[in-house]
Image (cartoon, rainbow, N blue to C red):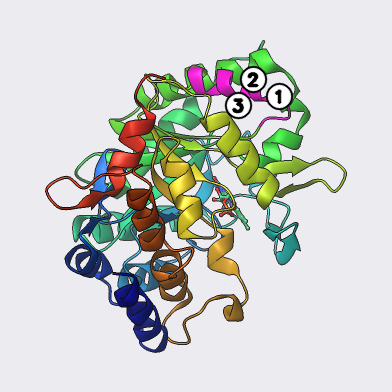
Amino acid sequence: MRAQLATDFERFKARALPRDFPSHVREAYGIDLTARYLGTMIPHPIGKGSGQLSLNQGQLEVDAEAGLAFAVLKTVIAQDAAGAQSMAAWAIHEAKMKVERRGAGWTVTWKGRGWDRSFEEYLALVRVGGDLTRAGHLLVVPSVKYHLPRLDEAFKETEYAFTTRALATAWGEPLLLLEKDFSPTLAGDELAAEQAQILRWLREVPVRIRAQAAVRLAVKVMNARFDDDFQVEMVRAAATADALVVFNRLFDAARGVAYGGPELSERNLRVLARLGPGIPELSGTGAISSGRDILEYARRGCESVQLHTYFQLPQDEYAATEGSRTQRALHRLVFDPVDGLIAGMLDLEARGVLERRGGELHFLDLSADAHRPR
Ligand SMILES: Cc1cc2nc3c(=O)[nH]c(=O)nc-3n(C[C@H](O)[C@H](O)[C@H](O)COP(=O)(O)O)c2cc1C
């Protein structure tokens, strides 16, 4: 199998990775990469996190063609029927984005803002996403940032109502899948300086959204500027969501920017290791740049992963010379003979961590094991 892996890695370098590579992985290696996001089974665990890489139909079509498992749309800022946005500060245009090294990894330095075009344009993209999802080409999930009040304020129900219903209508049947973003920039806002306030949001926001439409809801939990204990408390507070995306980027207060890289994955993995059973489905995010990184998140309970930075690296960071950036990234993440997902799963088998069932290794067995009471 190791020899086959080396051959596959070379072979797919020079010709674009086939869209249904998970079938090949199953046949050639007896590895079932099936994963899950928001209760939906997906052929493998790798999706794209919300951001600048899912702003238009063209990007989604390239990702569908590449066989990406899912894509989360750029976060739109909620509004009421008259177009008023209490979180309007996040809806401004921010163009400059810089891919930089950070420690042993990479980060994208960027001020971190939401969708900056009209809500109607976002709804058009959601319609495209619904169609791609129903056709089985790519699971697409919209993302929203809703009003987050101070402790003594009420939630702006009108924004929750108008935005959620409009998205559900644009999406169509069946049920709308939705991510609620507690953005990394928020961690730098004075609003996020109070623990009681944050816990209230995490407890109440899912209730407010569900009151407006039938949705399956993922809450993307931010990395708050508090210690690990509080991060665990945040997860518990958000436990009524159907899924949790864990955890969005760290905040560099001195530079006023969100960042990723090794510090982010270290913190995320440390906190995830402390979670016990009884929490919602988890989707990992944060400085994932190899199949082995994916397995670290999976072994701490994540049933899928959402990458952003890795899909933005300079072209020569990928081994493949053919195919779209998404295909090149997937090629390396899955087939790298040393750090790829297949190599990592074969190693876990050799170490007795993962066992074959019905002759196959199953990706989802890793997270299932993590959820067993410790
Ligand atoms: C340029 C950029 C824009 C982003 N925009 C959003 C966003 O609008 N909403 C959101 O929930 N996350 C956003 N993120 C966070 C990513 O989806 C992802 O969760 C995070 O960057 C951690 O993954 P990574 O280390 O693979 O980049 C953004 C990240 C980057 C780098």
Q: Give residue 148's mark.
A: 3
Question: Of residues 88 and 143, which is closer to you in this image?
Answer: 143
Which range of residues does the magenta coloring cover?
Answer: 224-236
Cα distance in 3D space between marks 1 and 2: 6 Å
Q: Are marks 1 and 2 in contact (CB under 8 Å)?
A: yes
Is residue 212 in view? yes
Asked whether, in this view, residue 244 is left or right of residue 149, the answer is: left
In the picture of the structure, the residue carrying the numbered disc 1 is: 227
Determine whether the residue tagged by mark 2 lies in a helix, strand or loop: helix
Which type of secondary structure does the marked residue at label 1 adopt?
loop
Q: Marks 3 and 1, Cα distance to the nearest angstrom?
A: 22 Å
Magenta stretch holds residue 72: no
State yes or no: Cβ of the residue under disc 3 lies below 8 Å from any atom of ligand 1. Answer: no
Task: Identify the residue under disc 2.
Answer: 230
* Residue 102 or residue 186, whichever sits in front: 102
Residue 28, x across and y down, in percent? 21, 69
Q: Nearer the viewer, mark 2 or mark 3?
A: 2
**Which SS class for mark 3?**
loop
Predominant SS of the magenta segment: helix
Which image quarter is the N terminus in? bottom left
